[in-house]
Amino acid sequence: MIEPSATASVPAARNLDSSDQVLPSPVFTGAVPHLPSPKLDWSHGLPCAAMGGFLALFLSFIPFFFFGPAFLAAGAFAVFLYRRRTLTPLNRRSGARLGAASGGFAFLFVSVVIIATVFYAPDKIREAMANQLKAGHYDPEAVRTLTSFVNTNAGLASCVIFTLLIILLICVIGASIGGAWYSAWLQKRNRG
């Protein structure tokens, strides 16, 4: 057992003269690689996102491209244009943001076309909806009820608003996934 002593041991004073200290030498590297930037320069990003939105508008006229591939391509195209314009790689999060902006522009362009069609030719829209419902194997009573609902202005407006909300989700989520995917692919390609 160790017994406490009356005098405490004091460590020896160190000489704090700066000439005695040894500093580590700095290490210099030849080239600093460009790391994916979390910052997105929106002054360059918004025009790229708008071009991606235009691409989605044109690709949505291809059958079955409206439900996803058009918007995946729009997000990827926006990241491609941004990378080409700024020579700055984007990380996945920034690619997803740029893709979401591209999806927002795509929704804007598609919704203008849909609203103009509904405004100038509502009878053709009603007829097309009725024909689509009759072609399916639905309950005839439910088809008559929905057709009579769509024949009113409030019913048509409700259906158009619901359709536009679904299209908004498809546009933004699809383009965001496309932008994140393409920026991740660029990161992987640049590493290997």
Image: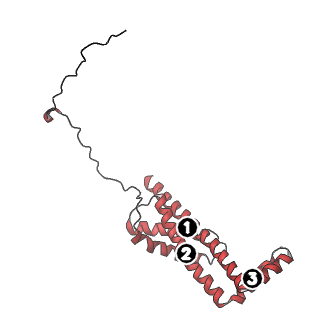
Alpha carbon of mark 1 to alpha carbon of mark 2: how far?
Answer: 9 Å
**Kind of element beneath mark 2:** helix
Residue 179 lies, in percent from the top left, at: 51, 64
Question: Residue at left 43%, top 56%?
Answer: 190
Residue that carries the numbered disc 2 in the rendered image: 106
**Kind of element beneath mark 1:** helix
Residue 65 appears in the rendering = no
Q: Amino acid at mark 2?
A: Ala
Q: Amino acid at mark 3?
A: Val
Residue 137 lies, in percent from the top left, at: 83, 73
**Kind of element beneath mark 3:** helix
Residue nearest the viewer, comparing 68 with 167: 167
Q: Quadrant of residue 145?
A: bottom right
Alpha carbon of mark 3 to alpha carbon of mark 2: how far?
Answer: 26 Å
Dot 2, crowdedness within 10 Å: few (<14), some or many (≥20)?
A: many
Residue nearest the viewer, comparing 174 with 34: 174
Dot 3, crowdedness within 10 Å: few (<14), some or many (≥20)?
A: many
Going from the N terminus, do you reach mark 3 or mark 2 first? 2
Q: Amino acid at mark 1?
A: Ala
Question: Residue at left 19%, top 22%?
Answer: 12
Q: Quadrant of residue 48?
A: bottom left
Residue that carries the numbered disc 1 in the rendered image: 175
Residues at discs 1 and 2 in contact (Cβ within 8 Å): yes
Work out whether 147 lies above or below 177. Answer: below
Question: Residue at left 79%, top 82%?
Answer: 147
Residue nearest the viewer, comparing 90 with 124: 124
Q: Quadrant of residue 175?
A: bottom right
Given this view, does label 3 or label 1 mark the residue nearer the observer?
A: 3
Residue that carries the numbered disc 3 in the rendered image: 150
